[in-house]
Image (spheres, grey):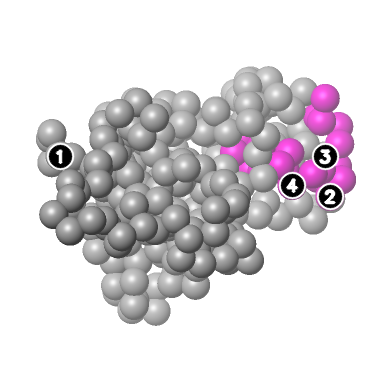
């Protein structure tokens, strides 16, 4: 089977640029890409829906461009239209599609011909719940057929790909994250942030490879210093027992480890 690699990093560091260079959409300003497979499929974060086609004719055209004979193109289009739930959109023009449906069309065109390299920029973005479940299946199919997958994700969905390599983009450099050692222990960390900064904080945590388990309101005012006595030990009688530490292995705190080893619990 092939390999999957997740490109992670904060917004603006160049993840999409790296993916486009790998896919052959952009040319590198220096150096060159080596050993790129002949069959490369590229799915951008936002599908270019401003095109004068309906769904079926667009996919048929893409199948022919991929080198499929007419009969094979029809079969492949029908298969992926059915697989991705696009049946009722066959005759709908691309500009009239919702973002999520357009993304499904992008996934369908990428799979018409088995790719040697599948490059996905935020593939879960805009998809409904059922379609999100399909993405790992598509990735697994490519890997099983010997292809490779390169993708980015800021939603934390790549926890479903435990065997994927992790590449971090930072300051113009790409580094590979070491895989977690067998039997490594993990901790669940709770943090409090201002409500206005929740979205940005979640995006940064996910970009750094952490899994966010949930978000809840802060009725106790932890962020303002309330409720910290038990956590810091302040107010504990001299010589008194240490406050009991939470058992991170307990069911209510347990969670699947991520490649980075960090987690955020609710």
Whole-angstrom CA distance, mark 3 to mark 2, is 9 Å
Residue occupied by mark 3? 54
Give the labeled residue for mark 2: 95
Label 3's element? loop
Neighbor class of circle 3 (other Cα within 10 Å; few <14, some 14-19, many 20+) is: some
Tag 4 or tag 1, which sits nearer the N-term? Answer: 4
Could you tell me how many numbered marks the image carries? 4
Q: Do callouts 1 and 3 mark residues in contact (Cβ within 8 Å)? A: no
Among the two numbered marks 3 and 2 on one chain, the one whose residue lies closer to the N terminus:
3
In this rendering, the label closer to the viewer, 1 or 3: 1
Pointer 1 local density, CA inside 10 Å: few below 14, some 14–19, many at least 20: few
Q: CA distance from mark 1 to mark 2?
A: 49 Å
Q: Residue at x 34, y 77 (%)?
A: 171
Of residues 99 and 157, the one drawn nearer to the viewer in this rendering: 157
The segment highlighted magenta reads 88-109
**Disc 2 packing (10 Å; few <14; some 14–19; many ≥20):** some
User: CA separation, marks 3 and 4?
Assistant: 15 Å
Residue under label 1, please give it.
184
SS at circle 2:
helix
Task: Determine the secondary structure under disc 4.
Answer: helix
Q: Per the image, is 67 magenta?
A: no
In this rendering, the label closer to the viewer, 1 or 4: 1
The disc at residue 99 is 4
């Amino acid at each position: 089977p092939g390999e999957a690699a997740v490109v992670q990093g904060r917004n603006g560091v160049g993840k999409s640029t790296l993916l486009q260079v790998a896919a052959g959409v952009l040319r590198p300003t220096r150096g060159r890409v080596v050993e790129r497979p002949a069959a490369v499929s590229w799915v951008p974060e936002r599908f270019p829906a401003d095109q004068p086609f309906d769904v079926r004719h667009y996919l048929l055209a893409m199948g022919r461009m991929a080198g499929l004979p007419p009969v094979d193109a029809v079969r492949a289009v029908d298969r992926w239209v059915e697989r991705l739930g696009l049946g009722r959109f066959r005759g709908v023009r691309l500009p009239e599609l919702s973002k999520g449906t357009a993304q499904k069309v992008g996934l369908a065109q990428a799979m018409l011909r088995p790719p040697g390299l599948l490059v996905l920029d935020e593939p879960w973005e805009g998809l409904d719940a059922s379609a999100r479940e399909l993405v790992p299946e598509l990735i697994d199919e490519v890997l099983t057929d010997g292809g490779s997958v390169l993708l980015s994700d800021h939603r934390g969905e790549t926890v479903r790909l435990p065997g994927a390599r992790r590449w971090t983009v930072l300051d113009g450099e790409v580094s590979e994250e070491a895989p977690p050692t067998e039997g490594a222990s993990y901790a669940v960390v709770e943090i409090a942030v201002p409500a206005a900064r929740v979205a940005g904080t979640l995006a940064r945590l996910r970009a750094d490879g952490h899994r966010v388990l949930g978000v809840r309101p802060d009725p106790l005012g932890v962020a303002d210093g309330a409720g910290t006595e038990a956590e810091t030990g302040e107010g504990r009688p001299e010589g008194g027992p240490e406050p009991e530490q939470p058992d991170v292995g307990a069911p209510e705190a347990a969670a699947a480890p991520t490649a980075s080893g960090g987690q955020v619990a609710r």
